[in-house]
Image (cartoon, rainbow, N blue to C red):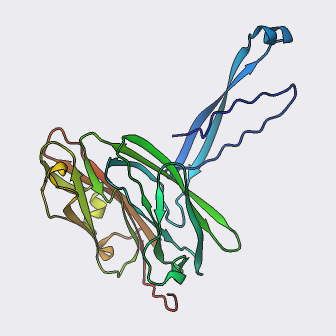
């Protein structure tokens, strides 16, 4: 959805020009078409202006853009629903797609109430450098509020090198106090794996703010394509009430086995995406969908000489 950063009234003299900049910041991959409207008030004559009467006009501006995958695999944190009075603290991981070291110069946030915390790394000298074809955590976000509202802010990741590059990530979190079930993580990124990589396991935790215990009916993936290489083991079927000290409860382990995933034809790299779907036995409880993604390469890669 388009967002107007600010509404501004501009008074122009006759034959004066005014330039309006439109920034395209896609939240998803694919083509996006939106229409912006400029509301214009024009005086028909000096007499009309002195009398305070203006003619009105509306100009529609149609903007089209195509969102492409970020080569550094930094995804917008949008569509997140989170409970009030509980800290939301996701970690941003960056991937280096180059054959040389990547330097992160700066990370900062604008707008909202998000604070940034650097990840714990024993070797601080290497905390802002990423080895070729490697993935590294660069910062953790902290958001906390005891009030319900739709949070919007932007995190900028500034990359160094001969050509400085700023990557802006929108952060949209719907903080709610109504009864619901929340997942941690809200999305799963398995990162970059080779076909001969060992199986990787990610645990799913749920928090229920309903007045009664919540029972899980099923946890599945949404595609038969992934079922051979992605397996789910349910470890808990009941979620106690949060206000009774339930907190986030581990409910399942999701395992990816790259060697069992189907290869795409004529592709050295295969990207797999989908959702983990969690359904509940309780009629008044909404289902939970957790998006997942993984990049799987043919062959193997080992790096030496980078700390």
Name the one closer to the observer, 88 or 295. Answer: 88
Which residue extends farthest front? 146
Q: Residue at x 12, y 56 (%)?
A: 237
Q: Position of residue 102 (x, y in %)?
A: 58, 76
Q: Residue at x 27, y 39 (%)?
A: 178
Name the one closer to the observer, 186 or 262. Answer: 186
Q: Position of residue 40 (x, y in %)?
A: 71, 23
Q: Residue at x 67, y 74 (%)?
A: 161
Name the one closer to the observer, 258 or 307. Answer: 307
Q: Residue at x 50, y 48 (%)?
A: 112
Q: Position of residue 111 (x, y in %)?
A: 54, 49
Give the quarter of the image for residue 103.
bottom right
Vertical placement of 66 versus 89: above or below? Answer: above
Vertical placement of 283 versus 107: above or below? Answer: above
What is the total number of numbered labels drawn onto the structure image? 0
Q: Is residue 158 left or right of residue 94?
A: right
Which residue extends farthest right? 15
Q: Is residue 212 left or right of residue 221?
A: left
Name the one closer to the observer, 299 or 99. Answer: 99
Q: Is residue 36 left or right of residue 262?
A: right
Q: Is residue 141 left or right of residue 100?
A: left
Q: Position of residue 46 (x, y in %)?
A: 85, 12
Give the quarter of the image for residue 107.
bottom right
Vertical placement of 160 versus 18: above or below? Answer: below
Q: Is residue 131 visible?
A: no
Which residue extends farthest bottom? 305
């Amino acid at each position: 959805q388009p967002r107007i950063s600010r509404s501004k009234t501009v008074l122009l003299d006759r034959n004066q020009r005014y330039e309006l900049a439109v920034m395209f910041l896609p939240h998803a991959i694919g083509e996006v078409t939106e229409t912006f409207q400029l509301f214009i008030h024009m005086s028909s004559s000096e007499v009309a202006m002195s009398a305070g009467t203006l003619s009105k006009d509306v100009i529609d501006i149609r903007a089209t853009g195509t969102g492409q995958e970020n080569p550094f695999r930094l995804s917008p944190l949008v569509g997140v629903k989170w409970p009030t009075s509980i800290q939301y603290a996701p970690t941003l991981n960056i991937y280096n797609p180059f054959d040389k070291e990547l330097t992160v110069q700066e990370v900062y946030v604008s707008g909202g109430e998000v604070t940034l915390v650097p990840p714990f790394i024993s070797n601080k000298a290497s905390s802002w450098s990423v080895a070729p074809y490697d993935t590294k955590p660069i910062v953790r976000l902290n958001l906390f509020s005891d009030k319900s509202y739709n949070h919007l802010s932007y995190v900028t990741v500034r990359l160094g090198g001969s050509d400085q590059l700023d990557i802006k990530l929108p952060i949209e979190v719907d903080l709610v106090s109504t009864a619901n079930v929340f997942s941690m993580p809200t999305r799963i990124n398995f990162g970059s794996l080779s076909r001969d990589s060992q199986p990787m396991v990610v645990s799913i935790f749920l928090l229920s703010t309903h007045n009664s215990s919540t029972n899980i009916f099923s946890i599945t993936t949404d595609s038969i394509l992934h079922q051979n290489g992605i397996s789910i083991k349910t470890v808990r079927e009941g979620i106690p009430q949060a206000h009774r000290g339930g907190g986030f409860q581990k409910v399942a382990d999701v395992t990816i086995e790259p060697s069992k995933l189907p290869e795409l034809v004529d592709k050295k790299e295969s990207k797999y995406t989908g959702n983990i779907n969690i359904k509940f036995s309780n009629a008044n409880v909404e289902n939970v969908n957790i998006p997942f993604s993984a990049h799987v390469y043919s062959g193997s890669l080992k790096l030496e000489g980078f700390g």
